[in-house]
């Protein structure tokens, strides 16, 4: 239980590079969400609680959140969040104080986030599925004043006061509070758009995750952009797909709850790309969804989102994906790193006839510059680095003034005192103003839609005592088969196996960053100057496709175990697999599991739930599930 204390909390220390970002000019906002504010200028100065409470006033009886078989309307969601917010204020939560939230997907998670924001605080998302070591690093680095969790989430054993939300004493204390909106005078200090909204940790090139501090200032333009492009109607079903630890989660949250729509949540197994995701979307009649290309590539689009919208983001949207997903629905292509309020530009509606898929034009209140090495503006189709400016630019990196100063720089093309974020992305702007993404200029990559600093993967593996040198690259020849490959030179004093190194990685890295393949080499290739030849290793990883037997053993396959082992070898591109092996220990991940499930359904006529795919201890157990399902 939380040790309650009174008095104000010290303001969160966030590195800044210059003054707060200037707000740019914007187009008119036609949505009903805007009609509650007197002017566009007033709209931009609003916070998340302002927008949400305006929706409650308009849509009180409309379903706000659906999770499983339960539904909660706007009025009840608002009341629950207000009651919890008053307990948080009593605990000392106020503007610019950070609250860690470790709650699984559920209505209670939405209540917790709204309560933190209504109290004036900012939320630090902690996905309970992440390794405890990584969660602990985030909490120690961010220094939140409070941790919210549920009883099914293990305590982090850190010196941070915590509140267990489903503890009967906590629930009773909340019930004694008023469900009315928080008045400005109830907060420890007035809440403004320049106060912190959330801190999200991203992969770090130095091997240490870094926290991006984002204020409310960009929310007005985010809402304006969503209104203009998506035309969300009251009660529309919006899928909540992204992990809580990513800013895309806030996009789903805002597209629903700041527009009077309904946010549909589901367990992770029901959101796995492929048949599980498709069934969830059909069951709930989803009208708006945001998915990465890797999920779109293995999910059948037929009958999904008819008359609604789909947004591809997180990676390159190919022409073939555009051709499939632009039929029967409006397709958008979004771009923007975590260092801005979810996004910076959006293209669409996109048709499949385009030779190259655009990332569109800047959001309302945003600017995207294509600059050369001397920060000169390139507007004639020349390729340069993308710099992002406007209301949505983050404050900087939490407690990292040096890193902040290197990435958030003065904007020579904007008003005095304005800043821009140096993205490290390459791109170009054509004469018609359309922007195109052209890759990265550093060691950062996108794999399955996740932003990964290969340096962080290397740093984790290098911390193993048996490892001398590590080089991480991306293998695979398609967005759905891309994976991280780590080449390791062991120390001459130790022996180490791939399984031991993968387990070491799993203790600190989230699932999407754990290498699918770890190759131990006696020597790594070098260039003439003695440096490691990363290009040669990347080419080796892309070519890597061992000669996989068409069948296990000789003659006709005699058991589901043999059939399944063959499928696993071909799916993972490995040379051997036994019934005693675990799919994920062999290098599998969630997308490859979805690919395997789809192949089992096609070739064996068996639909194995994704929950069973994850729960099976080994391939023998999975084969038994297949046999029972025939």
Image (cartoon, grey):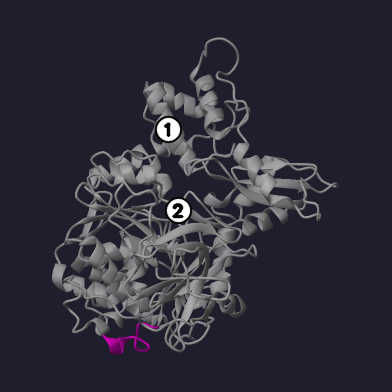
Residue 529 point in image, percent of width and height: 81, 56
CA distance for labels 2 and 1: 23 Å
Identify which residue is drawn at 52% across, 22% down.
561
The one nearer the camera, 528 or 15, is 528
- Asked whether the viewer can see residue 535, the reply is yes
The one nearer the camera, 249 or 379, is 379
Q: Is residue 330 above or below residue 138?
A: above
Q: Secondary structure at mark 1?
A: helix
- Disc 2 designates what residue? 315
Q: Which residues are magenta?
A: 183-194
Q: Is residue 285 above or below residue 436?
A: above
337 with respect to 334 (left or right): right
Q: Earlier in the sequence, mark 2 or mark 1?
A: 2
- Disc 1 designates what residue? 597
Q: Tag on residue 385? A: none
Residue 85 point in image, percent of width and height: 33, 76
Q: Is residue 17 above or below residue 430?
A: below
- Asked whether the viewer can see residue 161, the reply is no
């Amino acid at each position: 239980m939380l040790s309650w204390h009174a008095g104000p909390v010290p303001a969160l220390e966030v590195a800044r590079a210059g003054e707060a970002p200037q707000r740019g000019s914007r187009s008119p906002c036609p949505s009903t969400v805007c009609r509650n504010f007197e002017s566009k200028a007033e709209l931009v100065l609003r916070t998340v609680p302002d927008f949400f409470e305006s929706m409650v006033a308009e849509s009180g009886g409309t379903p706000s959140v659906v999770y499983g078989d339960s539904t909660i309307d706007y009025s009840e969601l608002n009341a629950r969040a207000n009651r919890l917010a008053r307990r948080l204020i009593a605990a000392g939560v106020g503007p610019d104080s950070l609250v860690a939230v470790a709650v699984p997907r559920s209505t209670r998670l939405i209540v917790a986030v709204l309560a933190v924001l209504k109290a004036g605080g900012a939320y630090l998302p902690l996905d309970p599925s992440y390794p405890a070591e990584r969660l602990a690093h985030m909490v120690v680095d961010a220094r939140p004043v409070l941790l919210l969790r549920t009883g099914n989430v293990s305590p982090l054993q850190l010196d941070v006061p915590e509140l267990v939300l489903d503890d009967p004493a906590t629930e009773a204390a909340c019930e004694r509070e008023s469900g009315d909106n928080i008045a400005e005078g109830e907060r420890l200090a007035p809440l403004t758009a320049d106060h912190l909204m959330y801190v999200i940790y991203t992969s770090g090139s130095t091997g240490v995750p870094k926290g991006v501090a984002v204020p409310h200032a960009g929310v007005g333009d985010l809402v304006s952009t969503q209104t203009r492009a998506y035309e969300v109607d009251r009660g529309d079903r919006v899928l909540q797909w992204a992990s809580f630890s990513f800013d895309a989660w806030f996009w789903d949250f805002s597209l629903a709850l700041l527009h009077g729509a309904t946010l549909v949540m589901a367990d992770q197994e029901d959101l796995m790309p492929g048949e599980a995701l498709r069934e969830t979307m059909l069951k709930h009649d989803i009208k708006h969804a945001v998915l990465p290309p890797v999920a779109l590539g293995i999910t059948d689009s037929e009958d999904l989102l008819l008359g609604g919208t789909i947004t591809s983001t997180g990676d390159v949207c190919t022409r073939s994906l555009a051709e499939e997903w632009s039929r029967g629905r409006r397709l958008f292509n979004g771009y923007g790193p975590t260092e801005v309020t979810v996004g910076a530009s959006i293209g669409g509606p996109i048709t499949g006839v385009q030779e190259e898929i655009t990332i569109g034009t800047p959001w309302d209140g945003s600017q995207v510059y294509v600059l050369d090495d001397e920060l000169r503006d390139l507007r004639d189709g020349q390729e340069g680095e993308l710099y992002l400016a406007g209301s949505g630019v983050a404050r900087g990196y939490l407690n990292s003034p040096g890193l902040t100063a290197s990435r958030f720089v003065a904007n020579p093309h904007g008003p005095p005192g304005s800043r821009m974020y140096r993205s490290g992305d390459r791109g170009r702007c054509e004469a018609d103003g359309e922007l195109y993404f052209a890759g990265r200029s550093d060691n950062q990559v996108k794999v399955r839609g996740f932003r990964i600093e290969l340096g962080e993967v290397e740093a984790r593996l290098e911390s193993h005592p048996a490892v001398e040198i590590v080089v991480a690259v991306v293998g695979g020849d398609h967005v759905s088969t891309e994976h991280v490959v780590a080449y390791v030179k062991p120390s001459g004093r130790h022996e180490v196996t791939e399984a031991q190194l993968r387990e070491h990685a799993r203790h600190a890295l989230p699932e999407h960053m754990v290498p699918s393949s770890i190759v131990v080499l006696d020597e790594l290739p070098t260039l003439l100057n003695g440096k490691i030849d990363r290009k040669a290793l990347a080419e080796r990883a892309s070519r890597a496709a061992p000669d996989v037997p068409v069948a296990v053993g000789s003659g006709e396959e005699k058991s589901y175990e043999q059939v399944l082992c063959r499928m696993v070898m071909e799916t993972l591109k490995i040379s051997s697999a036994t019934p005693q092996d675990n799919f994920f220990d062999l290098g599998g991940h969630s997308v490859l599991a979805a690919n395997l499930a789809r192949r089992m359904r096609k070739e064996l006529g068996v639909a194995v739930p994704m929950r069973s795919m994850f729960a099976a201890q080994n391939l023998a157990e999975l084969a038994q599930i297949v046999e029972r399902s025939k």
